[in-house]
Amino acid sequence: MKKTLLKTTALLAAMLLSASLAIAKPKKSGKKSAKDSEATAAALKTATEDFVRVEAGTFMMGSEYTREEDKYVGYEKEEGPVHSVTLTRSFYMCDHVVTNAEYKAVMGKIHRAAPKGDNLPVVFVNWYNAIDYCNALSELQGLTPCYTKKAGNVTCDFTANGYRLPTEAEWEYAARAGDGTTDKNIWSGSSEKWIIDILNDPNLDPHTVSQEGSMAEYVWFEHNSDKKMHPVKEKKPNAWGLYDMTGNVWEWCWDWYAPYDSEAVTDPTGPASPQGQWPKRACRGGDWDSMCIFCTVTRRGGCQPNGDGMANMRSFRVVRTAED
């Protein structure tokens, strides 16, 4: 009986000691620190204020360079035919792609595989992630979300005042920044046109293009990127104040990916439904690991909206339809 009492007393003492230690140990409050709150506020500021107004207008979209004998025609053929596009709605476009810090401030976290750095473009985001970000940011700012998701389908109200992805036409119009060249590929911000010499001369290798031309002042591509993605806004902006429109990362657009038509169009938003056996959403701009010919304002790409292909090279920037 005495031994049992001693054991019981010892057990109670151990339990009391454990409880006291638990009480003494500081607990995580779950609240953001002042530093975290300041970082979130700073990220939301750049995410919602660093915008450029793009006035409505008409431009020639696409490239005429679609010669069948060209060894790169497999990549160029869907950049044509050149066609007239009229945009009747002015819009505001963020001057940079969404960053890690901005995405985390809105969505709570970034993908575990994403390269670390607050000012790096957020990557490992599929098209649906980008749509969700746009709606979440709209709601945070008390704006009307543009996107409605129902039974797996996404529709866009382009008249809503919330954030959204640019259409392909809006993206190219902004990337061109007033440059109406259609017979030769160009890069956003650069006036160089010598890419045609590269494509026409079988002795020239696009992989060895000099990094000393003006293109390299605006674009991160395979020859000057050191094989890695770079923080936003390190290169020069184009004439309308938009950074990294070509190079560094591919950018999601709204449209389903499909060939162009030659007829003039007004406010195009792409096909109403997916095209082909493997439906894709349009991506634009090229990336840090691309040859220069893949980083032009007319370059088109497409990726499955929920796929992981090229996930470490794909990001997005947002726009808002102007209300006046």
Image: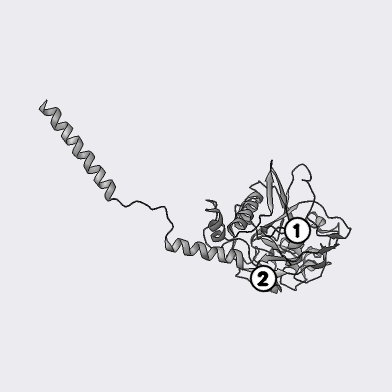
Q: In screen coordinates, is 91 left or right of 99?
A: right
Q: Quadrant of residue 69?
A: bottom right
Circle 1 Cα neighbour tier, 10 Å, few/some/many (<14 / 14–19 / ≥20)? many
Q: In screen coordinates, is 169 left or right of 262?
A: left
Disc 1 or 2, which lies upstream in sequence? Answer: 1
Amino acid type at circle 2 is Tyr
The residue that appears at 63% across and 67% down in the rendered structure is 224
The vertical placement of 109 against 180, above or below, is above
Badge 2 is on which residue? 218
The vertical placement of 247 against 310, above or below, is below
Kindly identify which numbered label has been placed on residue 9. Answer: none
Location of residue 156 in the rendering, given as x and y in whole percent from the top left corner: 72, 52
Badge 1 is on which residue? 168
Q: Quadrant of residue 213?
A: bottom right
Asked whether the beta carbons under mark 1 and mark 2 sit within 8 Å of each other, the answer is no
* Residue that lies at the very extreme toward the left in this rendered image: 2
**Between tags 1 and 2, which lies in front?**
1
Tell me if residue 71 can be seen.
Answer: no
Q: Quadrant of residue 199?
A: bottom right
* Residue that lies at the very extreme toward the right in this rendered image: 263
Q: Which SS class for mark 1?
A: helix
The residue that appears at 75% across and 53% down in the rendered structure is 255
Q: Quadrant of the C terminus?
A: bottom right
Location of residue 205 in the rendering, given as x and y in whole percent from the top left corner: 73, 63
Report the Cα–Cα distance between label 1 and label 2.
Answer: 21 Å
Nearer to the camera, 271 or 162 = 162
Nearer to the camera, 106 or 63 = 106
Amino acid type at circle 1 is Glu
